[in-house]
Image (tube, rainbow, N blue to C red):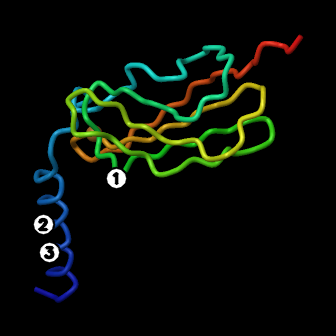
Amino acid sequence: MSSWVRRGMAVAGAAAIVAFGAPPVSSSMHLALKRSEPGKDCVVMTAPTTISLWYTARPNVKLSKVTIMGASGIIATGTPTMTEERGAPVVAPITGKVIPGTYTVTWLAASSDGHAIRGTFNFTYKPVAAK
Ligand SMILES: [Cu+2]
């Protein structure tokens, strides 16, 4: 047997192990966003200081990311945190200035199988006009 044939078989064997060793992909393992604060498509009258995200399953907070995009660009956010409490949300502090307008929140969270799930929603900050 020539060396390139042996190499080819070794590669095929390794590929088979990878294919059969991989856990079955189940979408039921994937978390989803249940609700948020500010809520999807909500109009808030006071500038939010945090973004809270409640998921259908507890994500790995270390792999959670939150981005807030407004008309003038990305609003700075701090590191997301989550308490040990069951059903606790992932909370990202907003460190940048939130001016009136519509914002798009992009969230990224890791499911229990390690797959990153992402989604977006909008909210609008519209303070009551001063008289
Ligand atoms: Cu997955």
Tell me which numbered mark, 1 or 3, is placed earlier along the sequence: 3
Image spot of residue 63 (x, y percent): 36, 51
Look at mark 3 in the image and give the residue it sits on. 10
Q: Residues within 10 Å of mark 1 (few under 14, many from 20)?
A: few
The residue sitting at 15% across, 72% down in the picture is 9
CA gap, disc 1 and disc 3:
37 Å
Amino acid type assigned to the residue bearing label 1 in the image: Lys
- Residue furthest to the bottom in view is 3
Helix or strand or loop: what does disc 2 sit on? Answer: helix
Q: Could you tell me which quadrant the N terminus lies in?
A: bottom left
Tell me the quadrant of the picture where the C terminus can be found. top right
Mark 2: few/some/many CA within 10 Å (<14, 14-19, 20+): few
Locate residue 125 relative to residue 84 in the image: left or right.
Answer: right
Label 1 lies in ligand 1 vicinity (Cβ under 8 Å):
no
Disc 3 from disc 2: Cα separation: 5 Å
Say what amino acid the circle numbered 2 marks. Gly
The percent coordinates of residue 107 (x first, y second) are 49, 37
- The answer for how far apart the CA atoms under marks 2 and 1 are is 35 Å
- Image height check: is 85 above or below 116? above
Residue depicted at 17% across the width and 58% down the height: 18
* Residue linked to disc 1: 62
* Residue occupied by mark 2: 13
Per the rendering, the mark at residue 79 is none
Q: Please tell me whether mark 2 or mark 1 is closer to you in this view.
A: 1
Please name the residue shown 35% across and 31% down the image. Answer: 89
Label 1: state its secondary structure: helix
- Label 3 near label 1: C-beta < 8 Å? no
Find numbered disc 3 in the image and state the secondary structure of the residue it sits on: helix
> Mark 3 belongs to which amino acid?
Ala
Return the residue found at the far right.
131
